[in-house]
Image (cartoon, rainbow, N blue to C red):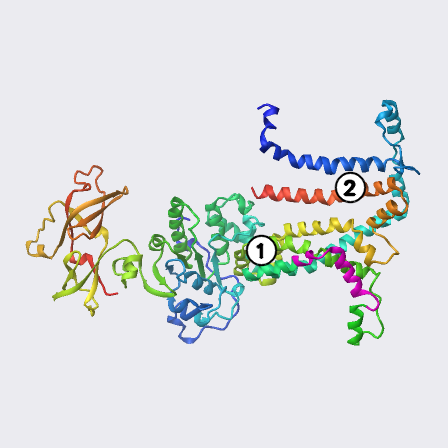
Amino acid sequence: MTDEPATSEPPLEVVAEPARPAPPAEAADIPLLRIEAVVKQFGGFRAVDRLSLDIRAGEFFALLGPSGCGKTTLLRMLAGFETPDEGRILLDGWDIAPLLPHERPVNMMFQNYALFPHLSVRDNIAFGLKRAGMAASEIAERVAEMVALVKLEGLEKRKPDQLSGGQKQRVALARALARRPRILLLDEPLAALDKKLRESTQAELMALQRRLGTTFIIVTHDQDEAMTMADRIGVMDRGRLEQVATPRQLYEAPASRWIAEFVGDINLFEGEVASREAGRLVIATREAGSIVVAAPLQPITKDVVAVAIRPEKVKLSRRGPASDDADHAHAINRLEGVVTDVGYLGGTTTYRVQLDSGAVLRSSMANTARIDIDAYSPTHRVVAWFTPDDCLVLEQ
Amino acid sequence: MSARRIFAGPARLAAIAPYLWMALFFLVPFGFVLKISLSQTAVAQPPYLPVFDFTQGLAAIKAAFAALSLDNYRLLVSDNLYVLSYLRSLVVAAVSTAILLLIGYPIAYGMARLPQRWQGIAMMLVIVPFWTSFLIRIYAWINILQHDGLLNQILLALHVVSAPVVWLSTDSAMYLGIVYSYLPFMILPLYATLAKMDPALTEAANDLGASPQATFWLVTFPLSLPGVGAGALLCFIPILGEFVIPDLLAGSDSMMIGQTLWLEFFTNKDWPVAAAVAVVLLVLLVVPLALYDRLQRRQLEAGR
């Protein structure tokens, strides 16, 4: 799975795509996949609640959310294992609701791989091709291509239980990609791998996706995984999409307090808007005094808000920042306190600073030098500082 | 580690207990049966010769050994009665097992797909007949199948037939009785294999373009073969030696080997021939058991 130019690949075509009439006239700008107000109920429980989403062709999209948020149910509706109670799912502008799972040009990689234990690696990969009625020679060719793609050469005759976890994962991937699906659905594809293997596999999946140009939709509860791999992330909670954004937007401009807390670490201080000046707001917080923040693009309507600062935006120093620009020195937020905990993580160190008000502020600083004469230890008194632009104002 | 230490302590005792059990209650009795099968029938008590009498000294025992012969086995091969009985037993066991599989598989498959809380109830329904004595249930079938029995009454009342049909003492009645009696032994191992099968496997097959039928034949059925093997053996082996059901429900024109054995033992009082019949039956049963054992061993090795 190297980054070879895409041109070295044979043209992508779908194997078992059912015959269908030409898409409607306005096809030019319709997304590859459109989910329209889809509802799925299990008994009285709404697993998916009027959810709408467009996914573009070639996109690497991640559905991220805590367990039970409905992300797997949504994926299973795309594969055809569940039928929506309301709403439509359109592929290329065509409603795929009447298509059974085996008729959809969509393939899925299952969470525990679901490899057929009685079939060899080769027969597992060839399974979908045989169902599509491909000629034996073509099947052999495609299987060899897939085996090479996921680097499983020499293991073709093994049975799944003679493979390691990482190898099984590759077989599952090759099997799901063999039919050249329009969309590849991945249900927690890396959850069963250990950390090191997970990271290298993430990189391989991304390279593979770029090379094949296939649309990937991945379901995960692991935010690092979603952030690393996806072009866009849809954050789900209680059957609804809370925010659909790029990883950077999601992290730096979360739409709600829930997302801010769900994605990454964050310091939150509740307060009231005390004054508004050009481009700046002053928020009076109970725990951290007055904090100057950059005014958000969308005007704040509520009085009670939360100020959110990511730990890596909070710098520590013994005296406070030395500002080149004396005029703007007042604009930098300074909070004084005592270091209570130091967590050394190798690349970064996290500090917990107990402010004089009693509140705890977390800071995370990169260890850029091997020998850090400036390191802080518990009981050190420090100034924690951050700029107005580093702060987020969240209304809900 | 010395041999004494290997067999010391209660844990070691527990390990050899099954072998002791087998030796005491299988090998030793089998030795008796084997010896009787090599003896000659006699009007005596016990009704065969020679008898080992350890009080008469070594020479008498040597003479007794010399008197043993394979005559009874020669009789089994030469007389059509025995060969036909064995054949009939094999055919009845094979046909019954096939019918049981055809009926039991869909039931087990349906059970495994029920919601979890219904599966326990379905399991109860399969097991509940065991609460009544097997013999009573067979007699109940006689009642249902006889000339003025429940089945004929219903058929007459519905005007399906104009005169009572002979059900009892036919092969159909025997097959009905066998299938009815052995169905749980077929269903339970099949259900056990099907219920533990990962439902994601059938979804994966569906997802890869296999229709529900193709999914069944390409994934579900091959993966349920261990259950099929276990169920088939659990039925085939006891049916092969079945005595009660053919005796009560089938006609008297042809006999299964169990009936022949009973006849030799109780009616003809020919213990040696009866013993020889039993030994040959056991040898016949060892073949499918050994095959199944090899199959399981191979699966265990593949699972490693």
Type of amino acid under label 2: Val
Subunit under mark 1: B
Q: Which stretch did the figure color magenta?
A: B127-148
Horizontal side of A117 relative to B169 (left or right) equals left
Point out residue B44 in the picture as x, y percentages from the top left corner. Answer: 91, 37
Q: Is residue B28 above or below residue A313?
A: above
Q: Disc 1 marks which residue?
A: B195
Prevailing SS of the magenta stretch: helix
Horizontal side of B118 relative to A280 (left or right) equals right
Disc 1 secondary structure class: helix
Residue drawn at (83%, 63%), measured in percent from left and top? B168
Type of amino acid under label 1: Ala
Camera-nearest residue between B269 and B97:
B269
The answer as to whether the residues below labels 2 and 1 share one chain is yes
Subunit under mark 2: B
Q: Is residue A133 visible?
A: no
The total number of labels drawn is 2
Spatial separation of the CA atoms under disc 2 and disc 1: 34 Å
Q: Disc 2 marks which residue?
A: B283
